[in-house]
Image (spheres, grey):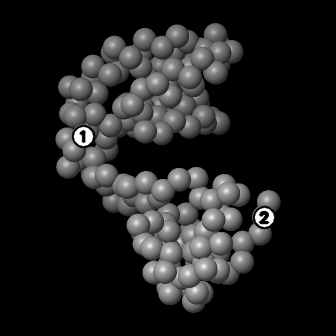
Amino acid sequence: MTQLDAYERKILRELQRDASQTTAQIAERVGLSASPCWRRIDRLERDGFIKRRVAIVDREKVGLNAHVFAQVKLNAHGRANLDEFAAKIREYPEVLDCYVLMGSVDFMIRVVAEDIKAYERFFFEKLSQLPGIQEITSTVALSEIKATTALPF
């Protein structure tokens, strides 16, 4: 793993805060001139520290008002076919995140939908139809206290 120096850490923090900044703006904020700052950003992208640059869209403004966390437990057959489950979950645009867990459930899935009725359709028509599912527990988020994509380093 490549070590990050203090400038690179500052650059990454600035990009996490606002990736639309120009290289000159970032350079000024971190205390570098534009050329060395650009070279460091380029290296961070090439080395995979920066996966991609995206816009963070307000889900409610685009009509996705239901935010649901689903815990999925697979039966023995399902556990033997984790790759099949994972491949199918990746196809669903409603699923924003999916994590394999250690413990009493196998997966935690974060899902968005227009409303609870839309989530219900997703649940019955897609999620619960996946092979190997033993149990699904859905929890609806009422409000958001904190949401960030910025890593603390």
Figure quadrant of residue 144:
bottom left
Residue 134 in view: no
Work out whether 68 lies above or below 130: below
Residue 33 percent across, percent down from the top left: 58, 87
Q: Is residue 51 left or right of residue 92?
A: right
Residue under circle 2? 2
Disc 2: CA contacts within 10 A as few (<14), some (14-19) or many (>=20): few
Residue 64 is marked as 1
Judging from the image, what secondary structure is the residue with disc 2 in? Answer: loop
Report the amino acid beneath label 2.
Thr
Figure quadrant of residue 22:
bottom left
Residue at the image point whose x is 41% and y is 67% from the top: 20
Residue at the image point whose x is 77% and y is 69% from the top: 3
Closest to the observer, 137 or 1? 1
Residue 62 percent across, percent down from the top left: 22, 44
Residue at the image point whose x is 60% and y is 17% from the top: 84
Closest to the observer, 31 or 116? 31
